[in-house]
Image (cartoon, rainbow, N blue to C red):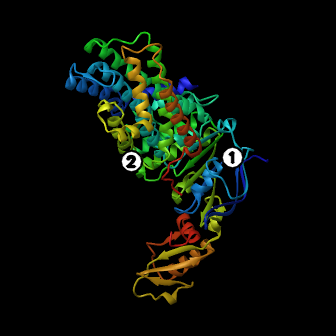
């Protein structure tokens, strides 16, 4: 299986007339953090729930840790941890008691204190789950998914609805899974989350994978034109420039595929005219630009 | 494994104020109120003292509150909040989760009933059954197990946590009134007694009343009542086996 932890071929899921997942292929390698990125309703949760063994598929081949999740048993569940999109803490139990309860479900659980520390809930171990903040509850969810010391962890939209500092803290936890050697399958609709965490990203839109790559190469991002922008004094007209350019809102934009050469040409031209371009800015398309282009502006 | 689940389910139950009130405190209040109202009048078909009538009557309520009412509410809430689904993502077998929670319900039901018996004994001088003690225990256990099965069946018809409490009360309150739990049903018109006769509450209450009747002979077991309870339990189990789900009814895409 050349190290593939998850292998999906031609996966389809139909709900009546709606095809939520319309034939996707995926491969996730051991030790990789894989982000499944897409707008709401794109088919992310349907896919991840098929991989977790919660939903039956309409068609296609699925292998997770060498097993078809539709027929997986306890032995397989010992090796997989799942953070579901929506789940409340166990009512009436403290963080420690929750973890003790779940530790009892697994053959070889991690230590309770170690797991509490891993998700940064030290000092909250004796707090009731219901009394935790949203971010802390999510960390408890992650702790519950890790308590069985799984090889593979599913995280379904782990930071939806978080404030920025809670998101940063959650990212640190997920990043920590990399050091533990876990394989992580993450779904998200935040581009920056995928960009910060993932080794590889697949973008799903309308049930189909529309792009796949690393955060640097996704959607041909590394080959896409960069933008050089600056403003010109009123005395200089745009058509005097040595490069094709257009002006809008007082700023001039040059689309550039050879940034270094174009910047040199522009600089030589400006210096020869004793022009300073103090607000010159060179920008590669952001992952967000690529993502919006891939998933359509209406998302 | 069942004991592991049972330990934490019982702990969660005892920490929940609402469960404690409806399951433990309310039956005690009912017992005190009804005995105070009817004093030492002779009541019921067996013409016994009010306290001797209400200890088994309210015991039936306690069994139902512990097994049925509490289970419906907590299982629906756990299902809708994703707690059950998350547990199913672990290697724990489904039957361990069901058995652990059911055992909690049965222990709570029998525990509350024991409290009622002790209050009856020491506050109202209601003699604890001796020769008919098997009748008390067997009826309570069969009743608790059957009402647990019915609880799992009913959860499959409730779509949200908020609907659970009103739903169980709407079902149980009228049945308590017509089944001899709150008022002796000799006072009811016969058609209403026929209705009560169909449902399981009447048979649990009747079985317990019989076992407490000082004039009862033998072990105090009313087999016909146990039979009806068991049939209802079996029907509940069948419905639950077909319809029970671990994932929220309000599933998201």
A161 vs A291, nearest the viewer: A161
Image height of A161 relative to A260, above or below: above
Q: Are there few (<14), some (14-19), or many (20+) residues within 10 Å of tag 1?
A: many
Residue A234 falls left or right of residue A141: left
Residue A148 seen in the figure: no
| Chain of the residue that carries numbered disc 1 in the rendered image | A
Residue A274 location, x and y as percent? 46, 80
Residue B40 falls left or right of residue A90: left
Task: Name the disc covering residue B163, or none.
Answer: 2
Q: Are marks 1 and 2 in contact (CB under 8 Å)?
A: no
Which secondary structure, mark 2? Answer: helix
> Picture quarter containing residue B48?
top left
Which residue: 40% across, 39% down? B194
B79 vs B253, nearest the viewer: B79
Residue A126 location, x and y as percent? 41, 28
> Picture quarter containing residue B50?
top left
Q: Disc count in the image?
A: 2
Q: Residue furthest front?
A: B190
Residue A73 location, x and y as percent? 68, 39
Task: Name the disc covering residue A69, or none.
Answer: 1
Residue B169 location, x and y as percent? 35, 41
B212 vs B25, nearest the viewer: B212
Residue B60 seen in the figure: yes
Residue A26 falls left or right of residue A153: right
Q: Are there few (<14), some (14-19), or many (20+) residues within 10 Å of tag 2?
A: few
Which residue: 50% across, 46% down? B156
Task: Name the disc covering residue A243, or none.
Answer: none
Q: Residue furthest right?
A: A1
Image height of B15 relative to B127, above or below: below
A291 vs A14, nearest the viewer: A14
């Amino acid at each position: 299986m050349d190290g593939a932890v998850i292998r999906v071929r031609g996966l389809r899921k139909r709900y009546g007339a709606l095809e939520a997942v319309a034939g996707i292929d995926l491969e996730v390698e051991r030790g990789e953090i894989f982000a499944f990125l897409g707008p709401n309703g794109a088919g992310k949760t349907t896919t991840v729930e098929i991989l977790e063994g919660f939903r039956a598929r309409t068609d296609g081949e699925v292998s997770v840790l060498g097993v078809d999740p539709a027929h997986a048993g306890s032995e397989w569940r010992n090796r997989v941890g799942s953070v579901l999109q929506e789940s409340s803490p166990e009512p009436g139990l403290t963080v420690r008691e929750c973890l003790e309860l779940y530790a009892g479900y697994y053959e070889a659980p991690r230590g309770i204190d170690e797991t509490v520390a891993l998700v940064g809930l030290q000092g909250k171990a004796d707090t009731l789950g219901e009394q935790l903040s949203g971010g802390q509850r999510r960390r408890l969810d992650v702790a519950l998914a890790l308590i069985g010391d799984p090889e593979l962890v599913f995280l379904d939209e782990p930071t939806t609805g978080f404030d920025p500092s809670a998101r940063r803290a959650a990212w640190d936890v997920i990043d920590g899974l990399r050091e533990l050697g876990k394989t992580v399958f993450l779904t998200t609709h935040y581009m920056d989350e995928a960009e910060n965490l993932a080794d590889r990203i697949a973008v799903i839109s309308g049930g189909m994978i529309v792009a796949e790559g690393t955060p640097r190469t996704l959607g041909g991002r590394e080959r896409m034109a960069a933008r050089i922008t600056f403003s010109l004094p009123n005395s200089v007209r745009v058509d005097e420039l040595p490069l094709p350019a257009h002006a809008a809102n007082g700023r001039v934009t040059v689309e550039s595929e050879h940034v270094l050469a174009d910047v040199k040409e522009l600089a030589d031209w400006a210096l020869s005219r004793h022009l300073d371009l103090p607000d010159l800015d060179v920008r590669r398309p952001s992952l967000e630009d690529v993502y919006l282009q891939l998933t359509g502006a209406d998302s | 494994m069942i004991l592991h689940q049972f330990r934490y389910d019982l702990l969660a139950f005892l920490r929940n104020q609402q469960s404690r009130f409806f399951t433990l405190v309310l039956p005690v209040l009912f017992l005190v109120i009804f005995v105070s109202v009817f004093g030492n009048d002779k009541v019921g078909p067996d013409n016994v003292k009010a306290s001797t009538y209400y200890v088994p009557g309210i015991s039936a309520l306690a069994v139902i509150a512990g097994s049925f009412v509490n289970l419906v509410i907590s299982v629906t809430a756990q299902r809708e909040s994703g707690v059950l689904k998350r547990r199913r993502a672990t290697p724990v077998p489904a039957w361990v989760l069901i058995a652990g929670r059911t055992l909690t319900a049965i222990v709570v039901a029998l525990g509350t009933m024991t409290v009622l018996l002790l209050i009856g004994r020491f506050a109202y001088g209601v003699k604890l059954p001796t020769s008919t003690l098997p009748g008390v225990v067997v009826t309570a256990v069969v009743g608790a197990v059957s009402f647990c099965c019915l609880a799992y069946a009913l959860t499959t018809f409730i779509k949200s946590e908020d609907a659970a409490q009103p739903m169980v009360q709407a079902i149980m309150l009228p049945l308590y009134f017509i089944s001899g739990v709150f008022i002796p049903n000799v006072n009811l018109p016969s058609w209403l007694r026929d209705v009560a006769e169909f449902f399981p509450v009447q048979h649990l209450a009747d079985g317990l009343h019989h076992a407490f009747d000082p004039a009862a002979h033998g072990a105090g077991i009313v087999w016909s009542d146990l039979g009806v309870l068991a049939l209802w339990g079996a029907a509940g189990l069948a419905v639950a086996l077909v319809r029970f789900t671990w994932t929220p009814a309000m599933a998201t895409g």
